Amino acid sequence: MTELAQWTSFYVIVGSSAGALIGLQFVVLTLIAERPHHSAAEAGSAFATPSVVHFGVALLLSALLSAPWSKTTTVAVAWGFIGLIGIIYAIIVARRMRAQNAYKPVFEDWLFHCLLPSSAYVVLFVSAWIAYSNTRPALFLVAAATLLLLFVGIHNAWDGVTYHVFVNRPKDIDEQDDSQ
């Protein structure tokens, strides 16, 4: 039995959560789709899409690390590759955030959309190298990175929904509120 077998329950919980949250994101986006904003597409690729990507990566890592691998070092190559792709994606997200004009990002946006996801992906990449010499700490690092991506996705999804509900309200709703 590899050390990965001890992590099965953890990844079942995290993977189930990530999968459910991906579905919930689609429901929420469908509900607010009737309220398009003039530059919603470029803001969506900078702020909404990364949440689904981070949930997807958490789900992928959960599935990958729940599989019955004979050696941990074999799966370490896969999670290291995911970390490398994630680092590249985080750079793309930062460029999209800078280029979009729908919203001026504040420090919290840079923290949760760029810095924390980048950190999680760097941890994934580095932990792949650590796995070759010290498996146990590497598995804890992968678990921490997976949870960080899940929590970042939760924060960003909530932030996006509250922005649309409280800030980006249609004018007809504001006019109804004023008339009452």
Image (cartoon, rainbow, N blue to C red):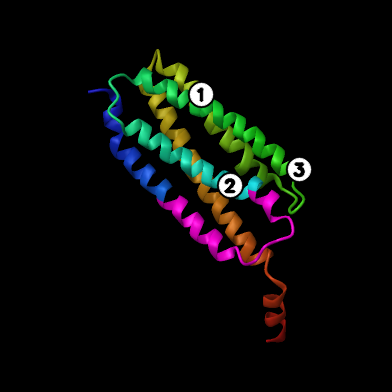
Residue segment shown in magenta: 20-44
The span from disc 2 to disc 3 (Cα, nearest Å) is: 15 Å
Relative image position of residue 46 (x, y in whole percent): 66, 45
Does residue 39 belong to the magenta stretch?
yes
Specify whether residue 165 is in view.
Answer: yes
Q: Secondary structure at mark 3?
A: helix
In primary-sequence order, the first of circles 1 and 3 is 3
Q: Residue furthest left?
A: 1
Query: Alpha-carbon neighbours of circle 2 within 10 Å: few (<14), some, or many (≥20)?
Result: some
* Quarter in which the N terminus is drawn: top left
Which residue, given by chain and number where applicable, does mark 2 sit on? 49
At label 3, which amino acid type do we have?
Answer: Ala
Which residue, given by chain and number where applicable, does mark 1 sit on? 125
The residue sitting at 70% across, 41% down in the picture is 96
At label 1, which amino acid type do we have?
Answer: Phe
Which residue, given by chain and number where applicable, does mark 3 sit on? 99
Specify whether residue 122 is in view.
Answer: no
Q: Secondary structure at mark 1?
A: helix
Residue 91 placement: quadrant = top right
Q: Secondary structure at mark 2?
A: helix
The residue sitting at 68% across, 52% down in the picture is 41
